[in-house]
Amino acid sequence: MDLNVVGPIIGVVVLLVLLVLLVTSRYKVAGPNQAFIVTGRKGKAVLNPETGQLTTDLSGQKVVLGGGVFVVPFIQKLATMDLSSRRISVQIRGAVSGQGIKLNLDGVAIVKVGGNADQIRLGAQRFLSQQADIETFTQEVLAGALRSIVGGLTVEQIIRDRAAFAQRVADESESSLTGQGLILDAFQIQDVTDDGTYLADLGRPEAARVSQEARIAEANARQAAEQAQIAAEQQIAIAQRTLALKQAEIKAETDAAAAQAAAAGPLAQADRDQAIFTEQEKVAVRQAALTERQLETQIRKPADADRYRVETEAEAKRTAEIKAAEARRAATIAAAEAKAEETRLTGEAEKARRSALADATKLEGDAQAAATLAVGQAEAAAMDKRADAFAHYNDAAVLQMLIEVLPQIAKEVAAPMSAIDNLTVLSTDGAGALPKQVVDNVAQTLQMLKTATGVDLQSMLKSAVDTSSSSSGEVVPGSAEKSPEG
């Protein structure tokens, strides 16, 4: 082969190989969780109608999803965006609810980059070189939304409707995430706690109600079990009674059959003996007659008597057992009824006794109150009458009463002296001092009476004496008239 021909052929082959290698190395195929962004083309010009500003859109950034693309060397550049879902934990501490309760919330969010070209371009602009920051950004957005929504809800609303609460958080954070090219696939609240006992106290009433219902159900179950056991025992007792009666009946029938069987043997033997005796009768009539009488007296009649005795004893025993069973049942029923009647009578007697005691206590209290009222009314009436009588008394009547009392006063004044056995008087007046002492005591007593009651007994006595003297015409000593000697 000519070298002039071989050389160009080898060159073409090498060029083709290099071209294939170049195409192979620059052709990229995106995976199912990847998006290729090819840059290098110029975007379209876009005029803002409000400001009149001319800008370039993002159409120059080619987005490839699940397909292949050839990247022109030195002109275009390929970037890869991960479209996989990211599980992000969201935790906030001390979020204040609408009631002022500080709550701690734990949640989990599923976030990924959007699945269309525009969202992929937005996500690439924000996170292409730092895709790990997607989790931090999402946590901050969701935490802010959580705190904002918790502040407008009560603890009960957050606890009882977590799905609605999580949906509100997703709705509020959707715009912030969508603006960054992200999509919130799901958001769930995993746990809600507090630093105090508020949440624990919320469940106590329900727990108490459930515990109460459980105790009631347990008591009802025990009651039903006891009732079922009582019913089963009653059925067992009835079955045992039926069995005992049936056993007694079978025993009676068995005894009767045994008696009949016992009697059948002697009867058969008697028949055989009778045949023998009949043959012997042909030989001697008298011997046959004698034998017949012996058979009648020695075998047949005792056998009949034994059979009758056995049947009679069996029937009597059966009757006795049936009557004994009925008597035990009647005794049990009678004892139960007597016990119930005794309990009822005891309760009624205790009730009657307490009622009678209460009535007697009431009557005694009423009688004492009536007696006290009657005594009080009588004393009040006596006091009223005495006051009326004193109101009608004049000085003379009062004086008369006081004069009647004076001897008693003098007696009481002189009582200490009357108790003296031997008295020695040391005085220049001698024995005349004693009457004087008594008079002084009486005068002091009258003075005390005047001071205590305002009644001047001396003045009343003097006035009475003066009145009496004037009416009788006697001359009172010390008056203006003088005696003849005077």
Image: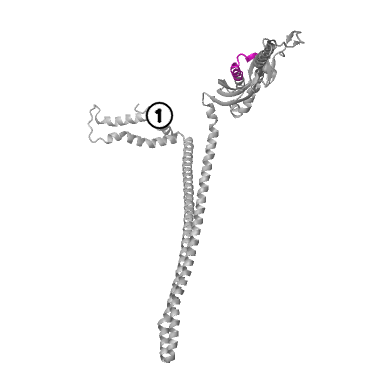
Which of 265 and 320 lies nearest the eye of the viewer?
Answer: 265
Indicate whether 215 appears above or below 72: below
**Residue type, mark 1 in image:** Ala
x 54%, y 25%: residue: 193
Disc 1 target residue = 452
Q: Position of residue 25 (x, y in %)?
A: 64, 16
The answer to if 140 sits in the magenta stretch is yes
x 47%, y 46%: residue: 361
Q: In this rendering, does residue 182 appear at all?
A: no
Image quadrant assignment for residue 476: top left
Q: Position of residue 69 (x, y in %)?
A: 69, 17
x 52%, y 45%: residue: 221
Magenta residue span: 125-143
The answer to if 474 sits in the magenta stretch is no
For the N terminus, the quadrant is top right
For the C terminus, the quadrant is top left
